[in-house]
């Protein structure tokens, strides 16, 4: 495996931009001594622009392309583009809100696996909109919620893809209790509605976080539901314990 990458960032008072490009070449020898070569390109871009003291535009664009010497059937493509508008009023900082749109396309190579080590069988293209709101009801208690909608299409055949709909509605209610000694406890109630599959799922998530300075907190928790609040994730293997690291502005 040979890889080379370059990254650059620029920032001043109201604008911050970061970009990175990586190229990787993988060569693997087969039992018959033939060599399979895969060339992969990855591009990452992040943007934050403060339009005023209360509003911020955030965005990212990630693109990956992977070509195999075995032919087009073994190639892969990935695109994730996100644009968000965040509201964090300076003079009433008890309220935080984020409106976000994501375009997601994933055509995994046949031997690609997901984070849960399961095969990525689907070609997915999705448009996802989400609104997330948190409000400090009292100094030690914050209440909030999230609604997200996915208009997605899936295909099983890589060579002649025939897409079928995969819509989803996600509802989340959340409470954060700010404990002494820089600890936070949270509980979420989640409901996922899948109209095309005529299915729905629900569950709870609990967690505890410790603040490490003013901009980072680390925590552990347990997801009692089997789905993720990230609607690009199509599998139901998310139940169980998790460890999370959160950065905040």
Image (tube, rainbow, N blue to C red):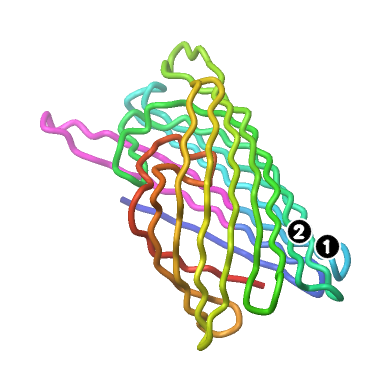
Q: Is residue 126 above or below residue 134?
A: above
Instruction: Give neighbour class at mark 1: few <14, some 14-19, many 20+ (Cα, 10 Å).
Output: some
Q: In the rendered view, does 229 fall on the left or right side of 149?
A: left
Write the residue at 70% across / 62% down. Answer: 17
Residue 175, percent across and down?
A: 58, 63
Q: Which residues are magenta?
A: 20-44
Residue that lies at the very extreme toward the left in this rendered image = 31
Majority SS type along the magenta span = strand
Instruction: Give neighbour class at mark 2: few <14, some 14-19, many 20+ (Cα, 10 Å).
Output: some
Residue 169, percent across and down?
A: 60, 35
Q: In the rendered view, does 32 fall on the left or right side of 60?
A: left
Lower sequence index among marks 1 and 2: 1
Q: In the rendered view, does 33 fall on the left or right side of 205?
A: left
Residue 238, percent across and down?
A: 38, 46
Which quarter of the figure has residue 177? bottom right
For mark 1, give the secondary structure: strand
Residue that lies at the very extreme toward the bottom in this rendered image = 181
Q: Is residue 233 above or below residue 184?
A: above
Whether the magenta-drawn stretch holds residue 46 is answered as: no
Write the residue at 56% across / 33% down. Answer: 105
* Label number found at residue 3: none
Give the labeled residue for mark 1.
55
For mark 2, give the secondary structure: strand
Give the labeled residue for mark 2.
86
Write the residue at 82% across / 69% down. Answer: 14
Residues at marks 1 and 2 touching, judged by CB atoms closer than 8 Å: yes
Q: Nearer the viewer, residue 76 or 245?
A: 245
Write the residue at 42% across / 16% down. Answer: 157
């Amino acid at each position: 495996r040979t890889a080379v990458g370059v990254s650059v960032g620029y920032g001043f008072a109201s604008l911050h931009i970061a970009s990175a490009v990586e190229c990787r070449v993988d060569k693997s020898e087969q039992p018959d001594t033939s060599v399979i070569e895969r060339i992969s390109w990855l591009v990452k871009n992040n943007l934050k622009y403060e339009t005023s003291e209360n509003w911020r535009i955030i965005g990212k664009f990630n693109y990956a392309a992977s070509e195999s010497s075995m032919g087009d059937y073994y190639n892969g493509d990935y695109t994730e583009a996100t644009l968000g508008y965040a509201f964090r009023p300076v003079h009433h900082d008890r309220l935080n809100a984020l409106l976000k749109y994501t375009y997601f396309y994933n055509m995994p190579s046949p031997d690609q696996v997901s984070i849960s080590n399961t095969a990525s069988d689907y070609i997915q293209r999705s448009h996802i909109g989400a609104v997330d709101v948190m409000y400090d009801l009292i100094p030690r208690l914050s209440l909030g919620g999230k609604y997200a909608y996915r208009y997605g299409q899936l295909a099983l055949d890589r060579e002649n893809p025939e897409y079928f709909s995969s819509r989803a509605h996600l509802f989340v209610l959340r409470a954060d209790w700010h404990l002494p000694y820089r600890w936070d406890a949270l509980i979420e109630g989640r409901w996922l509605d899948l109209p095309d599959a005529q299915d729905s799922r629900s569950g709870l998530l609990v967690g505890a976080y410790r603040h490490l300075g003013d901009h980072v907190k680390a925590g552990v928790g347990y997801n009692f539901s089997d789905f993720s609040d990230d609607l690009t994730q199509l599998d139901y293997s998310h139940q169980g314990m998790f460890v999370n690291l959160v950065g905040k502005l």
